[in-house]
Amino acid sequence: MIKKCLFPVAGYGTRFLPATKAMPKEILPIVNKPLVQYGVEEASEAGINEFGFVTGRGKRAIEDHFDISYELEHQIAGTGKEDLLTSIRDLINNNTFAFTRQNEMKGLGHAILTGRNLVGDSPFAVVLADDFCVTPEGEDGVLTQMVKLYKQFRCSIVAIEEVPKNETHKYGVIAGETMKDGLYRITDMVEKPSPDKAPSNLAIIGRYILTPDIFEIIENTKPGKNGEVQITDALLEQARNGCVLAYQFRGKRFDCGSIEGFVEATNYVYENVYLKNKEKKK
Ligand code: UTP
């Protein structure tokens, strides 16, 4: 039912300079796989097969990553390294990838609006690849959990997690009525509030399911915090006129937009995925 996913990837990734001077931060690898590929795999597992990317200048490597490299495949054909391309080859074969550019960085809300022509008129998912999410083996990924909820409630859903009070200024923070354990109906939302202005410690992370009426709401949303068109402002409007849910997902998130989160994620994947797979192959 949710078949499309938008990846806003136009940001400059300034926290990773100079690494991100000529390379998109979404291509930085967690061990041996680019951040953005983890996001696409999570969405693909949730039944999504059409991917739209809102890119910007200097992001060509993302397009190339989701395309076949005949030369490379030719080079490694018949060698033991062929397997290393299997995961990306499978994604390329089973999904479609489309790209559009956000010419000016006017905020996440504006980036999502820029992706409208890739998404059309159906409900869709949004993944911020720098929020890297993991769930224990055998459990649903975060987007799969959200798609299941969407089937039940048919309205926009944002993923949330508890953050320390002194970190609310990094996130959109919600207030809501509890519907059941871990599920809230949003009543208020503030973008990057200081701890004293935060309505709770429930912060929005980079996973959304949005109904398509959000586009018209974004069009009518004035620039907010930092002069950017904020998706939180548009979602608050949607919540006031209808319903937006906030879902405390099962799993763990790493903030790979920060150096600390990126290193933590790398250590986690090295120990829990890479070394385990190596052991299995022995
Ligand atoms: P961030 O502000 O965390 O990413 O935006 P950034 O700007 O790339 O990172 P720093 O702060 O300079 O290091 C969150 C997400 O929204 C996208 C970014 O690409 C990132 O995935 N985004 C943000 C856009 O695509 N367009 C925008 O105008 C703003």
Image: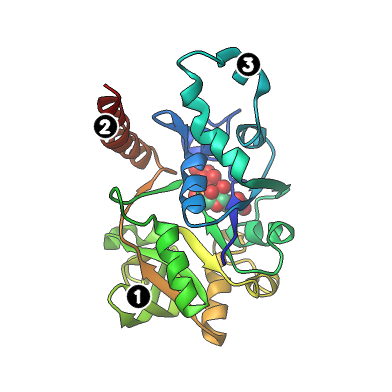
Relative to 186, residue 160 above or below: above
Of the two numbered discs 1 and 2 on the same chain, state the one appearing first in sequence: 1
SS class, disc 2? helix
- Residue type marked 2: Lys
Relative to 201, residue 36 above or below: above
Q: How far apart are marks 1 and 2 (CA)?
A: 34 Å
Do we see residue 18 in this rendering? Answer: no
Relative to 264, residue 31 above or below: above
Seen at 67% across and 22% down, the residue is 70
Q: How far apart are marks 2 and 3 (CA)?
A: 29 Å
Judge the density around disc 2: few (<14), some (14-19), many (≥20) Cα neighbours within 10 Å: few
**Residue 260: x percent and y percent?**
33, 39
Seen at 27% across and 29% down, the residue is 280
Q: Read off the residue under disc 1.
A: 183
Discs 1, 2 touching: Cβ within 8 Å? no
Q: How far apart are marks 1 and 3 (CA)?
A: 50 Å
Q: In which quarter of the image is the N terminus?
A: bottom right
Say which mark, if any, is on residue 111: none
Say which mark, if any, is on residue 276: 2
Seen at 62% across and 63% down, the residue is 229
- Residue type marked 3: His
Say which mark, if any, is on residue 74: 3
Of the two numbered discs 1 and 3 on the same chain, state the one appearing first in sequence: 3
Judge the density around disc 3: few (<14), some (14-19), many (≥20) Cα neighbours within 10 Å: few
Q: Is residue 171 left or right of residue 125?
A: left
Q: Look at the image and name its color scheme.
A: rainbow
- Residue type marked 1: Leu
Closer to the camera in the image, 29 or 124: 124
**Quadrant assignment, res 173:** bottom left
Q: Is residue 160 left or right of residue 74?
A: left
Q: Is residue 252 left or right of residue 256?
A: left
Depth check, mark 1 against mark 3: the one in front is 3
